[in-house]
Amino acid sequence: MNKRAWLTLEDGTVFEGESFGAEGGITGEVVFTTSMTGFQETLTDPNYSGQIVVSTFPIAGCPGANSEDNLSDYGGAAGLIVREQSVIASNFRCEETINEFMKERGIVGLYGIDTRKLTRILRKKGTMNGIISTTENADISDLKSFTPEITLISGTEAVTHKIENAKYNIALIDYGHRKSIISLFGKLNCSVTVIPFSETVNPADFDGVVLSDGAGNPAECIEEIEAVKALAAAKIPLFGIGLGHQLLALASGGKTAKHLHGHRGANIPVIDLESGRTYITAQNHGYFVSDLPVAEGVITHVNANDRTCEAIRYSNIPALSVQFVPSDMSGVNATVYLAERFLGLMGK
C-alpha cells in the first residue's frame, strides 16, 4: 500500500492523495499539461526541469514505458500529479510500469487527488510553487519566495549525428534539446552536431545554426543572448526553436513575458497568418515573445487562443524562429515546412 502524501500550494491550498514513483518529497513550480498521451515523453522533456507536472487527463501509464521513447537522456520533470496511475502496463513495446520508470529517474509522484480542481486553480491564479510531501502540515513559509531550479541543460561535449551525403551540416546549440529535433533534420538530409550552450560555435564550420528549446526564463540567459547576437552578426542562417526562438528575439531587441499558466499540451492551435491555415501543435513553455521591433522582423504565426507570437521571420538577418518544435506528421500537424524554410535560407 502506498503512503499518504499531500500537495501544498503557495496560496495554502492542500490536496491529499497517495505517493508513487520515487520516495520522499519535492518542491517545484506546479504546471499542467492537456496532453492525453505521452506521459514518458512529458517526464523526459528538459523543458519541464524543476517543475511538478499535473496531467489533466484522468489516468497515466497504461502503455508503460520503454527505453526508446525518452525525449532526452538528461533533464525532465521533478514531479508528476495524476488522478489515477495505471498499475497495469499493456503494450507490445512496454518494458516497465510508470511507477518503476519514475523510481529509476527520481521523479516524485502523487495520485488520487482532484486534478480538475487543481487545474482550475492554476488556470485562474497562474502557475505557482508547491510541495509534494509525506507530512500533512508542510512548512510553506518560504514557498512564495522559493525559486525552482529551472536551468539550461546540455551534454558535456559536442556530438555529431552524421548523415551520408548530407545536403547541409547544421550546428544545434543545446539548451536542453529534444531528440525529435535531430530526427527532424536527419529526415531532411542534414547532419547535426549538438554543441553544449557553454561552447563557442564557429560559423565557418557550418551551413546553419539551430538554437534549441530549453527551460527557464529567457531574459535571464544573458551570456546566451550575447552569443546569439554574435551569430546573427556573422549572417549565418539561424533557426530558433522554443527557448531558442525567445533568445533570438531578445538578441534582436525584443522582449519576453511570462504566461499566466503557459502553453503545455499536444493540442495547441496555431494560425499561419500568411496562409490563414490553422495547425495543431505540441508545446511546452511558460514564456513568450511579447514585443519585437518592427524593423527587425515580422510575426508569421500566432496562437489561436490568446494571439501570442508563435513564429517570426527576420528582415535584416537570415533567420527564422518558431515557439514549438516543427512536426513532420501529416494533416493538421504538418509544420515541417517551417524547417524547410530554414533549409531554403542555407540554400541561398
Image (spheres, grey):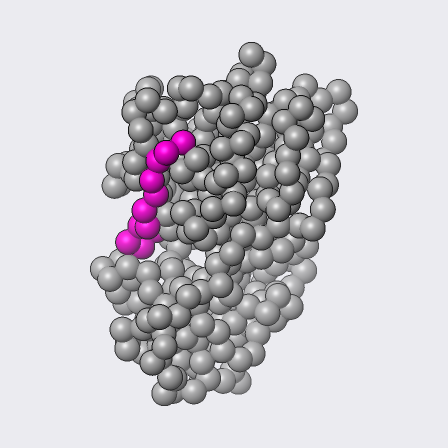
Q: Kindly identify the residue that appears in the image at 54 percent across and 31 percent down.
A: 230
Q: List x then y, in percent, for residue 154.
A: 62, 50
Q: Main secondary structure of the magenta part?
A: strand
Q: Which residues are magenta?
A: 252-262
Figure quadrant of residue 200: top right
Residue 281: x percent and y percent? 41, 38
Task: Say left or right for 35 vs 164.
Answer: left
Q: Residue furthest top?
A: 348
Q: Is residue 246 visible?
A: yes
In this rendered view, identify the residue nearer to me: 281 or 57. Answer: 281
Nearer the observer, 303 or 16? 303
Q: Position of residue 45 (x, y in %)?
A: 53, 52
Residue found 54% across the figure and 16% down from its top: 344
Lateral position of residue 186 relative to residue 21, left or right? right
Which of the two residues, 333 or 131, is positioned nearer the viewer here? 131
Q: Determine which quarter of the picture holds residue 29.
A: bottom left
In the depicted structure, whether residue 220 falls above or below residue 298: below
**How many numbered circles does the render carry?**
0
Please report the residue visible at 65 percent of the width from the left and 64 percent of the height from the top.
96
Is residue 286 shown above or below 122? above
At x 52%, y 72%, the residue is: 108
The answer to whether residue 292 is left or right of residue 61 is left
176 lies above or below 56: above
Does 258 appear in magenta? yes
Spot the residue most to the right.
164
* 12 is higher (above) or lower (below) than 151: below
> Where is the C terminus found, in terms of image quarters?
top right
Residue 232: x and y, percent? 51, 27
Does any portion of residue 60 appear in the rendered image?
no
Whether 325 is among the magenta residues is no
